[in-house]
Image (cartoon, helix red, strand yellow):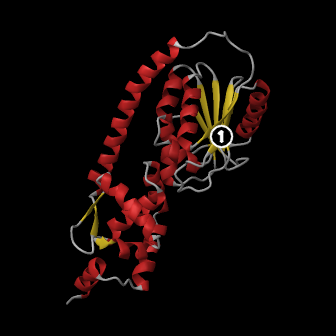
Amino acid sequence: MSRKAELQMRRTTSPFVTNEEKVHSIHFLNERKELLADLMNMGFEESEAIMYLGLLHIGPVTIGNLAIKLGLDRGKMYRSLTKLRNYGLVTTSFSNPVIVTATEPSKALDTIVEKKRDELDSMKKLSEKVITNLKTNKTDFGTSDTSSFSVLQSRTIIYNRIGRILDESDSNLVYIVTTTNDIAKMYYTSIPEKIQNAKKNHAIIRVITEDKPTKAISEMIKRLNASEVRVGELPSRGRMIVEKERQLVMSESSKSSADSGNSDVAIHTNSLEFVQNMFSLCEYLWNNSKEFVEI
């Protein structure tokens, strides 16, 4: 039997995994942290992203061997397997032991996109109904000049609020101060489109980010299509979005480039004093940064 055939048989039937195979698989994943982060931005949990990418690399394998090769808890692997199988991202055999196989990437990711599209359509239809019903039960108390303050939990909600700031920024100046890692995540949301719309409404969108981005990040910065971009030293690893004399969003730094974003926390306020102070900081950073040059 050839070495290749022997390894394939061990992958699918043997309960034993060599240290060489385990180290190689974990090294393979460590070299693809950005890809894992992209999968998590699409809605994968970390263990699911690791499992799917690992299966693509290793090939058909038992769940026990896969858990060992990837260094993951077997119980968590079974939970991830159920979700991935329900989404059509993996298939399992009727044999004993069960053999797990990853679905071809284009088909797998198309399934996720289609699921998200269906969820969005359902939410839009439901929201129209709920908004109509809520309006009929709303008491008009008039407007209030009191400053508001709210806490935003999760990256998705934070990005949605940033999008609303851009939507409301007619003929105004908005600063987006954040890391290149955060810009890479924003690139895959509706924020670039909202920046374009804000510019059409005569708003000025200025982006300040870190110096010396990678070539891939440099392309994403360019495609944000901000009015102006500068690079320099940032005051923190968090994000700061400030609309002149109106409102702001401030976030703490993200724990990891490969996290799902559920732990992201930010504050949103229209407190004039708070907004003016942060706007002054943005002006200072802008004046002390240099022009962004695409790689």
Quadrant assignment, res 155: top right
Work out whether residue 243 can be spotted.
no
The quadrant of the image that shows the N terminus is: bottom left
Q: Position of residue 176 (x, y in %)?
A: 63, 37
Question: Is 192 located above or below residue 15 in the figure?
Answer: above
Q: Position of residue 119 (x, y in %)?
A: 37, 36
Instruction: Return the residue nearer the eye: 230 or 150.
Output: 150
Which kind of residue does numbered mark 1 sit on?
Answer: Ala
Work out whether residue 219 can be spotted.
yes
Instruction: Return the residue nearer the eye: 77 or 248.
Output: 77
Q: Position of residue 9 (x, y in %)?
A: 25, 81
Q: Which residue is mark 1?
A: 266
Question: Is 129 located above or below residue 279 in the figure?
Answer: above
Quadrant assignment, res 228: top right
The residue at the far front in this view is 137
Instruction: Return the residue nearer the eye: 235 or 42.
Output: 42
